Structure formats: structure tokens, C-alpha cells
Image (cartoon, rainbow, N blue to C red):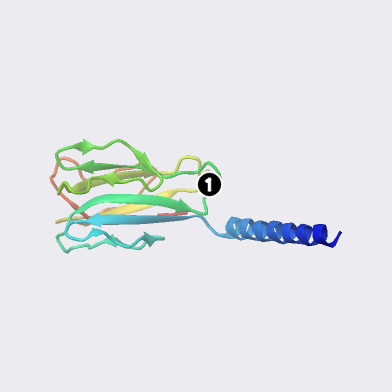
Amino acid sequence: MKMFAKNGEQNIDQAKGLLKEQFEKSQSPMQIVYQAHLQDFGWLPEAAGGATAGEPGAGKRLEAVRIKLQNAPQGASVKYSVHVANKGWLPEVADNAVGGTTGESRRAEAVKIKLPGCEGYGVFYRVFMQGKGWSVWCSNGQVAGTTGESRQIEAIEIYVE
């Protein structure tokens, strides 16, 4: 009987640990985490919560991004599309997939980001454009950056609220 009780206690402790972990996750706010692929640097460290990913004003082109959600509700995702030099708008990607190009030396010129399945949340983002500086804050699928001006993005900032 003691053997079963001990196993039962272990199972209860495991269940308590899982419940605690799920509770703590549910109490943490949803966050967006992103990474920029920059000319001559490759993938930069992850940024989050509106921090800058890239090198504004350094003259280095942003070539691609990866964007993901943390502590997101079930069924939530982040979808994004990047406008790339000589290719136009690339197909929409989601949940940390590469948006843009790597290894092709092509500049990203604009981005669109949205949050399907995230009722009650909005995504806000802006880009630093060569020769223009920071764009206005865009949200929920609006275009940040330029198309048809051959103007590279050098950095991006994103947050959810």
C-alpha cells in the first residue's frame, strides 16, 4: 500500500507543478518577441516589448524578420509579410518563420503585421527607413515603410497591447 501511496503522491506533486506552471503562464501578459536579420551581421539577438531590433541610422539594411508570441492565448498567432526589393510583397508567414530574405542581399522596404486569434489585443509597429527616420506607429496589418521608393528598412520596433 505504501508503494501506491508514494506513486500517488508523486503524481499529485507533478500535477500541482503543472497547474502552478499553467497558472503562472496565464498570469503573465502576452508579449511579442522578434529578431532582425541585418546586412553584415546576420540574425541579431531577440528584442521584445517595443525595443529596437536593427541599427537605425547605421546604413545597414534589414533583410528579414522573425516574430513570435509568448504567453499567447490558445489559437493565437502572429502573421506578417515583408516587401522586399525587386520581389515585392512576399507571401505572409506566421509564428517565427522567416519573413523577408536571407543570403540574397535584398533590402526589406516595408512590413505588415497582424494578430489573428488575439481578441482584445492589438499589434503596433514602426520601422526606421533610410533617409526618412522612424515611420509613424502602424497597427493591425497597416503598411510600415515604403514601396516603390527603393528605401531600405534599418530597424523595427513592435509591441502588443
Left or right: where 91 falls relative to 132: right
Q: Amino acid at mark 1?
A: Gly
Quarter assignment of residue 54: bottom left
In the image, what residue occupies the spot 66% across and 61% down? Answer: 17
Quarter assignment of residue 49: bottom left
Q: Position of residue 95 (x, y in %)?
A: 41, 45
In the image, what residue occupies the spot 21% across and 61% down? Answer: 41
Establish if 161 lies above or below 91: below
Q: Position of residue 65 (x, y in %)?
A: 30, 50
Q: Position of residue 91 (x, y in %)?
A: 30, 35
Establish if 32 lies above or below 148: below
Left or right: where 92 falls relative to 1: left
The quadrant in which the N terminus is found is bottom right
In the image, what residue occupies the spot 75% across and 58% down? Answer: 12
In the image, what residue occupies the spot 20% across and 42% down? Answer: 84
Q: Position of residue 109 (x, y in %)?
A: 20, 46
Of residues 158 and 138, the one drawn nearer to the viewer in this rendering: 158
Left or right: where 16 falls relative to 96: right
Label 1, residues with CA under 10 Å away: few <14, some 14-19, many ≥20: few
Residue beneath disc 1 = 120
Of residues 110 and 46, the one drawn nearer to the viewer in this rendering: 46
Q: Is residue 158 visible?
A: no
Establish if 149 lies above or below 17: above
Q: Is residue 18 visible?
A: yes
